[in-house]
Image (tube, rainbow, N blue to C red):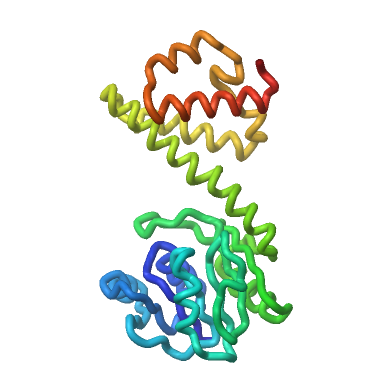
């Protein structure tokens, strides 16, 4: 079975790497950024092109959401399967006379970060049972966590991921701004961050909550607000209000 990866960003790189590591042949990696394509090609020993798509049975589109539909029009072969890797787009966004599907890996990807692909959940949606079986088999070679998912459910999966990952990382960035302003090494906070994440492997997040808001410690909350300004103050107030509402505090 011939597979082509379309894209040269973080998802394309890791998906190509995961497929290769698990014995799944990748016939080509295709995209616009020749410099990035060449780097991936050299590392993973996969042919690349920025001009012509090679013939394949499966095309996996790993590009930004706003480019998926446009890129999908480049695939003119009719008797093939095409999948996008977006968490927020329906498979119907794919524009062509081929079989449409989604192949969504639930993870944050950076090229420089080594990942354990076995732990990455994959969510699969297809137009027919045969393609569902095919993509599930491919994903199962990569990961121990593979699940069928409709678009309606996948929208909520992606929304949950934004709260759990993107928002959390933004708070890390804001926290570092505060520590940097006082010349406090941010790596001193890493054990606290690690313990916070580790706890929710063993406890419900709601049960693991600590801090002045859940204690309704108004003195500390007011003290912190005096130390903050602009966007960080707004975030601080919003987060504390959300915590109080969750725990029904005045």
Kindly identify the residue that appears in the image at 60 percent across and 47 percent down: 160
Image: 183 above or below 78: above
Q: Quadrant of residue 90?
A: bottom right
Residue pushed farthest right?
129
User: Would you place residue 66 above or below residue 156 in this image?
Assistant: below
Q: Residue placed at 48% from the left, 81% from the top? A: 73
Q: Where does residue 210 sit, x and y in percent of width and height?
A: 57, 23
69 vs 177, nearest the viewer: 69
Name the quarter where the C terminus is drawn: top right
The location of residue 244, given as percent across then percent down, is: 62, 22
From the viewer's perspective, is 159 left or right of 234?
Answer: right
Residue 96 in the image, given as x and y percentages of width and height: 56, 83
Relative vertical location of residue 52 with respect to residue 102 in this rendering, above or below:
below
Q: Residue at x 55, y 57 (%)?
A: 106
Quarter the N terminus occupies? bottom right
- Nearest the eye: 119 or 33: 33
25 vs 170, nearest the viewer: 170
The quadrant where residue 231 appears: top left
| Residue 44 shown left or right of residue 102 in the figure | left
Residue 198 relative to residue 173: left or right: right
Hey, which quadrant is residue 9 in on the image? bottom left
């Amino acid at each position: 079975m011939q597979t082509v990866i379309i894209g040269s960003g973080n998802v394309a790189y890791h998906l190509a790497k995961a497929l290769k590591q698990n014995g799944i042949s990748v016939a080509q990696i295709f995209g616009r950024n020749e410099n990035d394509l060449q780097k991936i090609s050299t590392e993973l020993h996969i042919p690349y092109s920025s001009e012509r798509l090679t013939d394949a049975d499966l095309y996996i589109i790993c590009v930004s959401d706003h480019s998926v539909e446009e890129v999908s029009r480049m695939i003119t072969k009719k008797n093939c399967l095409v999948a996008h890797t977006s968490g927020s787009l329906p498979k119907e966004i794919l524009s062509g006379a081929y079989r449409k599907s989604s192949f969504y890996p639930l993870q944050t990807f950076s090229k420089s970060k080594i990942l354990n692909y076995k732990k990455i959940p994959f969510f699969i949606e297809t137009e027919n049972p045969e393609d569902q079986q095919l993509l599930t088999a491919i994903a199962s070679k990569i990961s121990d966590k593979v699940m069928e998912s409709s678009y309606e459910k996948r929208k909520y999966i992606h929304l949950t991921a934004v709260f759990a990952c993107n928002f959390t990382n933004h708070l890390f960035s804001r926290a570092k701004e505060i520590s940097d302003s006082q010349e406090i090494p941010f790596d001193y906070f890493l054990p606290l961050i690690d313990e916070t994440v580790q706890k929710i492997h063993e406890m419900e997040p709601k049960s693991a909550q600590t801090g002045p808001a859940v204690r309704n410690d108004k003195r500390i909350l007011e003290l912190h607000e005096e130390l903050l300004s602009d966007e960080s103050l707004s975030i601080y107030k919003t987060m504390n209000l959300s915590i109080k509402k969750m725990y029904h505090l005045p």
